[in-house]
Image (cartoon, helix red, strand yellow):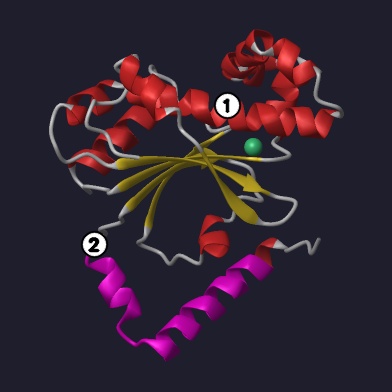
Amino acid sequence: MKYQTYEEIIKNNREWASEKLSIEPSYFETLSRGQKPPFLFIGCSDSRMALDTITKTEPGELFIHRNIANQISLTDMNLLSVLEYAIGHLKVKHIIVCGHYCCGGVTAALEGNAEGLVESWLMPIRELYRKNKKELDEIEGLKKRSDKLSEMNVILQVKNLCKTSVMRKVFKGKDYPKIHAWVIDIYIGRIKELKIPVSEFKERELLPKDYKY
Ligand SMILES: [Zn+2]
């Protein structure tokens, strides 16, 4: 992997800005007018999650919140304010909860070897593992086991998303964003769309009865 020095990334930025201007002279003027992104993306902080690159999106298209192992915590003011702003002001049409394979956070939770603040942060995933220990332990190999736990974690975080006061409120109306569960399959660079258990979530009043998948 190519290592970029600090000076190089500043130089890259200057080149990028010049390229953009040469293609579209009003590019930055348009960008500076404001944002209306259709997507809220909640994902992992992992450096390999280069979202604009892997989705071929441009500045202004993804509103983003990231943390270690894409956690949605009901007491996280940072996440909750992002969510409230994205729905209330930006009126995003889609909320994407996204994990990935080879996630260091998920693997640490699985192995139980995280330390300090990260250990506390990853506790919900450790609990998820304990809850599904039998199924996960039957999977051969740490990587595969961790990847399965990554998928389970995304669904758990979607469940948490549905429990937030912001979503409870918006679900009472007719016009709410669609929720998507993704993992990035880092082995092949592709997005894998996970099935959200919509019927079960409806039964448990996590999703509105008229929610269409
Ligand atoms: Zn990760």
Asked if residue 156 can be seen in this view, the reply is yes
Gap between marks 1 and 2 measured at Cα: 34 Å
Identify the residue at image location x=29%, y=38%.
Answer: 212
> Residue 116 at x, y = what percent?
68, 16
> Residue 150 at x, y = what percent?
64, 31
Residue at mark 1: 153
Furthest-left residue in this view: 173
Q: Quadrant of ligand 1?
A: top right
Q: Callout 1, which amino acid?
A: Asn
Residue 192 higher or lower than 6, as above or below: above
Q: What is the crowding at mark 1: few (fewer than 14 residues within 10 Å), some, or many (at least 20)?
A: many
Kindly indicate whether the residue at mark 2 contacts the one at mark 1 (C-beta within 8 angstroms).
no
Q: Horizontally, is 169 left or right of 206 in the view?
A: left
The mark found on residue 34 in the picture is: 2
Furthest-bottom residue in this view: 22
In the image, 200 versus 177, the foreground residue is 200
Specify whether residue 17 is painted magenta: yes
Q: Callout 2, which amino acid?
A: Gly
In the image, 15 versus 185, the foreground residue is 185
Q: Quadrant of the C terminus?
A: top left
| Cβ at disc 1 under 8 Å from ligand 1 | no
> Residue 58 at x, y = what percent?
43, 67
Q: Which residues are magenta?
A: 8-33
